[in-house]
Image: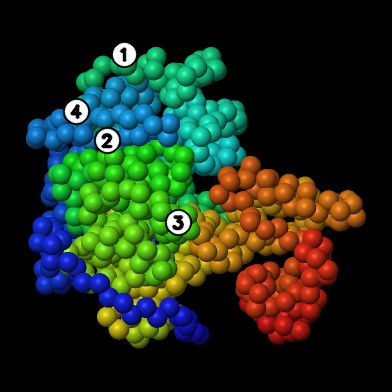
Amino acid sequence: MSESIDSVLKEKRKFKPSAAFAKNAIIGSATKLAALQKKAAKNPVKFWEEQARTLDWFKPWKKALVWKHPFAKWFAGGRLNIAYNCLDRHLKTPRKHKAALIWEGEPGEVRTLTYHQLYLEVCRVSNVLKNLGVKKGDVVAIYMGMIPEAVMAMLACARIGATHNLVFGGFSAEALRDRIHDSKAVCLITQDGAYRRGAVVNLIEAADRAVAQCPTVKNVLVYQRMSTRPTMKDGRDHLWQDLVPKAPTESPAEKLDSEHPLFILYTSGSTGKPKGILHTAGGYLTQVAYTSKIVFDLKDEDLYFCTADIGWVTGHSYVVYGPLANGTTVFLYEGAPNYPRPDRFWDMIERHKVTIFYTAPTAIRAFMRAGDEFPKKHDMSSLRLLGTVGEPINPEAWIWYHEMIGAKRCPIVDTWWQTETGSILISPVPGATVTKPGTATQALPGIIADVVRDDGTSCKANEGGSLVIKHPWPSMLRTVFGDDQRYVETYWRKFAKQGYYLAGDSARRDEDGYFWIMGRADDVVKISGHRLGTAEIESALVANHKVAEAAVVAKPDDIKGSALVAFVTLKADAAKAALGNGRVHHLKEELRAWVAKEIGPIAKPDEVRFTDALPKTRSGKIMRRLLREVVTGSVKTGVKGDTTTLEDFSVLEKLRQGDEE
Ligand code: WT7
């Protein structure tokens, strides 16, 4: 059955590229973009080969695409090195002494590293890793904050052919342990502490607890960010400052196969534990380099600031690899956006003269709420281009961003992509695309995207359906690490007959063919742009000895996009103790803190509601759709008295009749 999904958004405003921007843009006109798209659509493989040639290869590929549905090899037989492409090749050009990174710590210190300096550091770290026994093909976990050393660690892995596995510094020890364990990492790179909102995030303490349960990890390299020397475990821990400065600066870049695994990055899915998304070298770099260049219109004079943490895919592709492959100067900031005041970003844009700014809708909404006086205090005339990523941007926030931050002068690129896609697939090209607030507009050259019905046929204009990608692309995930079957099931089963990749988003295309993302079609939710699987949070809740059953759903939230509501059934004794003694509030807080400890503060439910039983179908499946209706207020449960008592779903009984999900 193909049920069309109704869309409520009807945004009509259009913004044409300004002549001033178009004049100097890499792709400066709609005609040029259309011609490129047409050419690429005719032969995507040939188009991507042209882009791959902009990289330095030690050995050319034999076949551009080997496609054994749904397993891809791009630029098969070719050999290259990612770190070489991000560093060494710039040393032969005037970029050698150009800044690669300009970093600002949360307390305010500033460091600049030129391409040559970054190269030397990366070589040193490579040698340290090799001395610690890390070999080509080994997995190295990285659990760090936003400091230049995290970038060095990534590039050093890439240089020696180790596969990195970054774990976001906001994740808990338990989440870190699971990700190290699943990836079988042999080494962990971490730091003692990171500054966040004036406080110190104790990374080493969490790392210690995680590694204690990870026998595969033989060595831990610790960068000292704080003033006192961290306590280290003998034989296992090594201080970065003891080893790296003394290490030699010669470290040949390994000539790696194009399909050599570059990184694993864990992301949440609709079921089970997080999936280790695997990306490989040649295709990934080809596409992140190309999209960085055309979507951000990168020029040598730019100072590019992407606010994403490198623990997420945006940080991998658009803080590190894409911009550095283009020889761009990347601005890196350690701390919280609103520290010490909500104008921290605007202040840094003014002081450093940032030209390109890429952030998330949730941040934009938070700044909007903080008040116009903060951006108004700053001269942001250096800015020439703005971007967003992570979730649909509501037109109101888009307009505010356009007017208040971009002074109506800067184009906005609303970029759609996923951890799995590796790089941006749907986005305006600045200077060429007419934009409309709320839509990521069109697929980039070389990408064949569509919105289809359950039978695989294309939807009509404005008819909702599933977002699919119809042709393999170079930076696509290669598999779910260690679980080919899950890879096939999650992304390729639904449209196996047609051979389409299922993105998991529902979307519609408007009368101009623009893509409007309507949200996730599965049980994945976006909280402040972060991707969480409700199943994962439910399983964390059920792991608590007081909890019998849990169901987690999202409800709309003005700033975070969505907020999490957890419906929890307690075990009888726990229920009696808490509900009888009026300790309901206390228990709710306890469970929220429990989830924060199990996964990380980002996964903490905003609300916990207790119930005797969860509404279920006759076959026993929890009716999450009903729960969603309950949290959005369209269905009343008959909560007894105040909200601190039990939620009563018995009034839903009649709705349940014959309502099998
Ligand atoms: C999901 C992927 C890719 C970097 C950050 C997120 C949503 C992402 C947009 C956008 C509407 C968007 C989708 C997608 N999403 N960008 N511009 N407009 N929705 O990566 O954590 O893997 O999440 O984020 O739902 O499937 P991710």
Type of the residue with mark 3: Gly
**Rendering coords of residue 600 (x, y %):** 58, 45
Task: Determine if residue 631 is in view.
Answer: yes
> Label 4 CB, ligand 1: below 8 Å?
no
Q: Which circle, 2 or 1, is nearer the viewer?
A: 2
Q: Which mark is residue 116?
A: 4
Q: Which mark is residue 371?
A: 3
**Rendering coords of residue 548 (x, y %):** 77, 56
Label 1: which secondary element = loop
Q: Residue at (22%, 40%) from the top-left corner?
A: 329
Q: Which residue is mark 2?
A: 101
Label 2: which secondary element = strand
**Cα–Cα gap, marks 2 and 3:** 31 Å
**Rendering coords of residue 610 (x, y %):** 77, 61
Question: Given contact means CB atoms under 8 Å apart, are the residues at marks 4 and 3 in contact?
Answer: no
Type of the residue with mark 1: Lys
**Cα–Cα gap, marks 4 and 3:** 41 Å
Q: Quadrant of residue 655?
A: bottom right
Q: Of callouts 2 and 3, which one flags the residue occurring earlier in the amino acid sequence?
A: 2
The answer to whether 342 is drawn above or below residue 24 in the figure is above
Q: Which circle, 2 or 3, is nearer the viewer?
A: 3
Question: Given contact means CB atoms under 8 Å apart, are the residues at marks 2 and 3 in contact?
Answer: no
